[in-house]
Structure formats: structure tokens, C-alpha cells
Amino acid sequence: MLWYCRFTWYPGTTSDKVRDRVLQQHAAGTNHPEKIRGWYNLAGGGAGFMLVETEDPREVTSILEPYMDLVSWDVHAVYELPYSPVTEHFKEMAAAAIR
């Protein structure tokens, strides 16, 4: 399962604090980079999102929890919609509705 994990820095959080925490958790082995499909910052800084792939939501919590004093998290399960197959399916559905 894929998890969309949006983060927003709390007031007072600095880039130094974030960098230090990422490196600390990396050294501790708790970031689990093998489960992070993507990590993105929003232009302007102070917010972004990660895509985490795991079947167990408890694993998502264990990855995000060490950062909860620096950022707030908004987490949702998501799934991919491949554009071409989806639009073809929509065409088939529309054609069936006309019949």
C-alpha cells in the first residue's frame, strides 16, 4: 500500500533541526529508505510530502514518529491511476451507459 504523508514544519523548526534529525534517524536505521518511494519539498520550504510504501500502517507511524516534534503529518492511503488505462476504462463505461 502507498501512503501520502504530507508534512508542515511547526513554527520554530529550522532547516538545521530537520537536517540533524534526518541524519540522526538515518544513523539509527529508522528512516527505512527502502520504503520511501519519493520525498518532495514544496517550493518555498517548510512543507512537503513523502510517499511511503508498506502494507502495515504501523510501519508508517514508526517512520514518521521521530519527526513529530518538528513537523505535523497528514497521512492518507493512496493508489495510482495510470492515465491511459483509466481513460480507456472511462470510455468503455461511457459507451456502456449509452446502450
Image: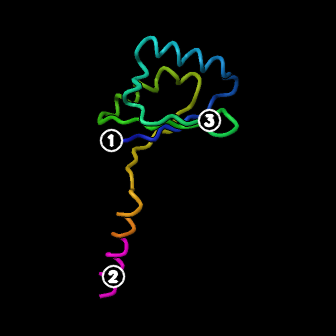
Residue 71 sits in which quadrant? top right
- Measuring from the top left, give residue 96's x and y in whole percent: 29, 81
Q: Is residue 96 magenta?
A: yes
SS state under label 2: helix
- What label does residue 68 carry, if any? none
User: Do the residues under discs 1 and 3 have CB atoms within 8 angstroms?
Assistant: no
Q: Disc 1 designates what residue?
A: 1
SS state under label 3: strand
Label 2, label 1: how far apart the Cα atoms are: 32 Å
Q: Depth-wise, is mark 2 or mark 1 nearer the camera?
A: 2
Question: Is residue 98 found left or right of 7 in the rendered image?
Answer: left
Among all residues in the image, which is located at the extreme front?
A: 84
Q: Of 40 and 4, which appears nearest the observer?
A: 40
Q: Depth-wise, is mark 2 or mark 3 nearer the camera?
A: 2
User: Of marks 2 and 3, which one's residue comes earlier in the chain?
Assistant: 3
Label 1, label 3: how far apart the Cα atoms are: 23 Å
Q: Disc 2 designates what residue?
A: 95
Query: What residue span does the magenta drawing correspond to?
Result: 90-99
- Measuring from the top left, give residue 7's x and y in whole percent: 56, 34
Above or below: residue 10 compared with residue 29: below
User: What amino acid is found at the position of numbered circle 1 in the picture?
Assistant: Met
Q: Quadrant of the N terminus?
A: top left
User: What amino acid is found at the position of numbered circle 2 in the picture?
Assistant: Ala
Label 2, label 3: how far apart the Cα atoms are: 43 Å
Residue visible at 47% across and 15% down in the picture = 25
Q: Disc 3 designates what residue?
A: 47
User: What amino acid is found at the position of numbered circle 3 in the picture?
Assistant: Ala
Q: Main secondary structure of the magenta part?
A: helix
